[in-house]
Amino acid sequence: ETGVTQTPRHLVMGMTNKKSLKCEQHLGHNAMYWYKQSAKKPLELMFVYSLEERVENNSVPSRFSPECPNSSHLFLHLHTLQPEDSALYLCASSQYETDTQYFGPGTRLTVL
Amino acid sequence: GENVEQHPSTLSVQEGDSAVIKCTYSDSASNYFPWYKQELGKGPQLIIDIRSNVGEKKDQRIAVTLNKTAKHFSLHITETQPEDSAVYFCAAGRTGNQFYFGTGTSLTVIP
């Protein structure tokens, strides 16, 4: 595994639940990312944080709310999700925004 | 933005044969092209990358070639082994911007 960890690895939630995904990187990087991976679709970039500031938000619905308290931790807060939000959510980090990204193992999310 | 197309979507080869996966991109300003391997239950892992000032890069059994004029780049795996079975993703991007990923190629190496 890389130096990027994600918890939980699997999550099942109802549409009215509130949950959070956590990502931690142990690589000393200063940029972190959230991606959504759905079957037979390209990886979709959701959010980018560089030096703990959000620099990219690709028109993601407000039911997804990111938080980056420091350069090592990244959260994705989930609220009132839809079944079509079921996917693998991947976290990645890099030394700079443009440098090679290293991925975590992902959280498999199922919304009932 | 960038548009990355990847072919084929599935590929089966006999152990020991070579495998080639091809990607095309649309933004001529893209200058960084990584390849990732994703095994079942894991996140994508970088296996090789190439920058636009280089035409070819090799790392043991894996090589990547880049044709900037035609805007395509390819991954070549020689002497394939069963452990090479995975989904492979290409990506393209440029300095200061996000990377765009292909849709992936599921490679199966048949023993």
Image (cartoon, rainbow, N blue to C red):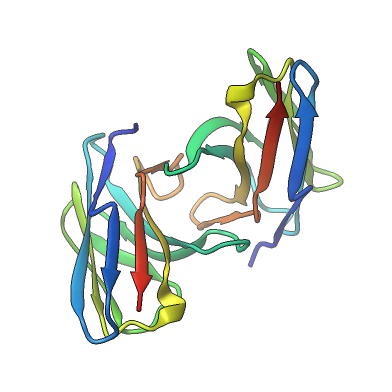
To which quarter of the image does residue B59 belong? top right
Q: Residue furthest right?
A: B70
Q: Position of residue B15 (x, y in %)?
A: 74, 19
- In front of the other: A48 or A64: A64
Q: Position of residue B29 (x, y in %)?
A: 68, 53
Tell me the quarter of the image containing the N terminus of chain A.
Answer: top left
To which quarter of the image does residue B27 belong? bottom right
- In front of the other: B53 or B104: B104
Give the residue drawn at x 20%, y 81%. A17
Tell me the quarter of the image containing the C terminus of chain A.
Answer: bottom left
Task: Say whether residue A59 is visible.
Answer: no
Q: Residue furthest front?
A: B111
- In front of the other: A4 or A101: A4
Vertical position of residue A10 compared to residue A79: above or below:
above
Q: Position of residue A65 (x, y in %)?
A: 26, 75
Give the residue drawn at x 29%, y 68%. A12
Q: Position of residue A20 (x, y in %)?
A: 20, 67
Give the residue drawn at x 21%, y 36%. A26
Vertical position of residue B45 compared to residue A111: above or below:
above
Task: Say whether residue A107 is visible.
Answer: yes
Q: How many marks?
A: 0
The answer to whether A100 appears left or right of B68 in the picture is: left
The answer to whether A58 appears left or right of A13 in the picture is: right
